[in-house]
Image: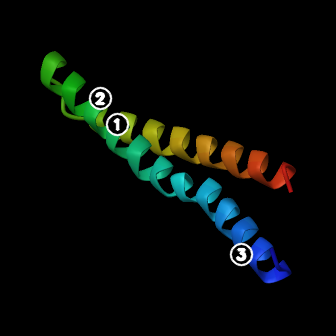
Amino acid sequence: MDKSSKDERRWTARAMEWIPLIGILPAMTVIGWGIGRLLDHLLATHYLYLVFLVVGIGAGLWLLLRAVNRLNKED
């Protein structure tokens, strides 16, 4: 196997590790918003969706930063 082929495989393997990170922040945001909306409906309030939206965004950023730090340490 020549050097360019090995480099290409190494690059694609690294890319496959980073691709799942794309969905962390949007997923956590939607989950937080959904939990807030559900609690708003059950408790007859109108503000919990905002609280849980912010919590979801914070949790998504925290998970994203943890994953990026872990992947960078592997380099």
Q: Nearer the viewer, residue 41 or 10?
A: 10
When the figure is inspected, residue 44 is found, relative to residue 17, above or below; the finding is: above
Q: Secondary structure at mark 2?
A: helix
Residue 31, numbered label: 1
Q: Which residue lies at the image location 36% right of the left edge and 36% below the top edge?
A: 32
Mark closer to the chain start, 3 or 2: 3
Q: Amino acid at mark 3?
A: Glu
Foreground mark, 3 or 2?
A: 3
Q: Picture quarter containing residue 33?
A: top left
**Pointers 2 and 1 in contact (C-beta within 8 Å):** yes
Q: Amino acid at mark 1?
A: Ile
Residue 35, numbered label: 2
Quadrant (top left, top right, bottom left, bottom right) of the C terminus: bottom right
List x then y, in percent, for residue 74.
84, 50
Residue 44, numbered label: none
Residue 8, numbered label: 3
Q: Give the class, few, some or many, for how many residues have Cα within 10 Å of label 2's Cα (few <14, many ≥20).
A: some
Foreground mark, 3 or 1?
A: 3
Q: Residue furthest top?
A: 43
Q: Residue furthest front?
A: 1
Q: Total number of numbered labels?
A: 3
